[in-house]
Image (spheres, rainbow, N blue to C red):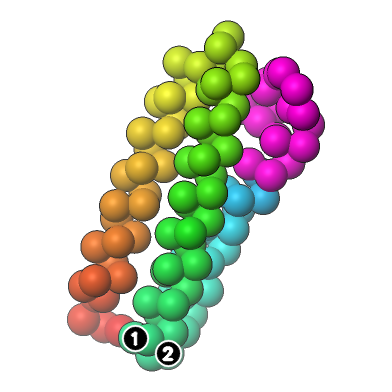
Amino acid sequence: MSKQLSGPGAATRADQLVRAALSVSSNIAEACGRGSIPEFRQFLQYARGSAQETLTQLRVAAALDPVHAHTIHEIEGRVALVIKTLGRLIAHPPPDR
């Protein structure tokens, strides 16, 4: 999707979108590798922040690129679900943590 963005600053926005999205999965992986619940939660909070950044970048992309707005809005819904799921995991970590 990021390669299809158009409008002012498309390359910069695409790069930021990719970096934010990669940060989500990287922080989730790091959270799973941590030994304590506080560390687990901390890295999930970082992941949630990166997901929020991803959502913001998608909203900007949809506003500046109406041709792809429908596809972008579908992705926004998926990112919103990730944010909600992370919130639940932060509030209620799995018992094996």
Tell me the SS state at disc 1: helix
User: Which of the image's four quarters has the N terminus?
Assistant: top right
Q: Position of residue 38 (x, y in %)?
A: 37, 86
Magenta segment, prevailing SS (helix, strand or loop): helix
User: Which of the image's four quarters has the C terminus?
Assistant: bottom left
Among all residues in the image, which is located at the extreme top?
Answer: 67
Tell me the SS state at disc 2: loop
Front: mark 1 or 2: 1
* Marker disc for residue 37: 1
Asked if the stretch drawn in magenta spans residue 50, the answer is: no
What span is colored magenta in the figure?
A: 1-17
* Marker disc for residue 35: 2
Asked if the stretch drawn in magenta spans residue 16, the answer is: yes
The picture quadrant where one finds residue 8 is top right
Mark 1 is on which residue type? Answer: Ile
Q: Position of residue 34 (x, y in %)?
A: 46, 84
